[in-house]
Amino acid sequence: MLNPQWLRTFEMLADVGNFTRAAERLGITQAAVSQHLRHLEDRLGLLVFRRPRGIEITPAGRALLDYCAELEVSDRKLRDRLAAPDADAGEIALISPGSIGLALYPLLLDLQAAHPGLSIRHRFAPDSEVLAAVLANQYELGLLTLKPDDERLKATRFAEEPLEMVIPAGETVRTWEDLERIGFVDHPDGLAMANRLLSRRFPGNTGARALPRRGFSNQIGLILEPVARGFGFTVLPRYARRAFARQEAIEVVECDVAVVDTLWLIHRAEWPLPRRAQRVVEFLCAQMAAAGG
């Protein structure tokens, strides 16, 4: 690693072209300028030719000046990243379950459209991956359906999300036999969600696993497509249902006793969020509150 003071001296010498003026500008002696140059040349080879009217930079010296410029750019980027002075610029990294992600991603794009200096990086993932990614500092912000028990994380209530039974438009569900007739459209969390909701709606039922399975999709945005085409019913979080484009093709069966998940916003507790991340959190909370989330 080259001494930063030697590099500053060399840059000044190359800029003014004279040992005496370089020493004056730097506030050091001419002997110190010569010493710094000698240390660099001991490591890198000849950097300047001394001429009667000044100096001439060698190819090795030009390469060293390019290196100094790259260091300056890197240093500036580091200081900008650490200072994070602008709430309207920089990357926002959020990882969330798919359902709430369907609701949040368009809002994040609206924010980016209003503040083009922001860059949005969003990933859909299950709770376990969300937790691991935030703990590994791969994402600044995460959303979980279960409050984490880890002192390294700060968890704040973000929103509530009921589970909903969604059926094809025009269908009627009054009894368990109706569900057996319609059949179940499954997804990665389908059976667990269905059992939680159906145990409230139909106490004593045999469980969703006993229902005829009419289809399966692991794409959160496509789970309701077979429902809309009349192939079966499913159970999903509300934000996934709201994001579906063809609302006229589906219906929600109301349940007397709601099953509601609390969504938790998490980030590392040991250091403060950058201003841009704080702004995003405030924006999303306000948007969710306005939407009744």
Image (spheres, helix red, strand yellow):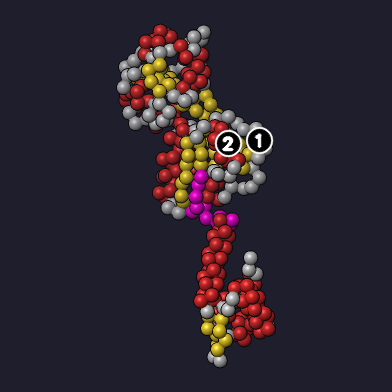
Residue to which mark 1 is pinned: 150
Q: Amino acid at mark 2?
A: Leu
Residue 201 in the image: x percent, y percent? 48, 13
User: Which is nearer the N-term, disc 2 or disc 1?
Assistant: 2
Decide: is 224 above or below 50: above
Q: Which residues are magenta?
A: 82-93
Q: Amino acid at mark 1?
A: Asp
Dividing the picture into quarters, in which one does residue 103 lie?
top left
Residue 193 in the image: x percent, y percent? 49, 21
Residue 102 in the image: x percent, y percent? 43, 35
Residue 89 appears in the rendering: yes
Closer to the camera in the image, 79 or 2: 2
Disc 1 is placed on an element classified as: loop
Quadrant location of the N terminus in the rendered image:
bottom right
Dividing the picture into quarters, in which one does residue 238 lie?
top left
* Pointer 1 local density, CA inside 10 Å: few below 14, some 14–19, many at least 20: few
Closer to the camera in the image, 81 or 32: 32
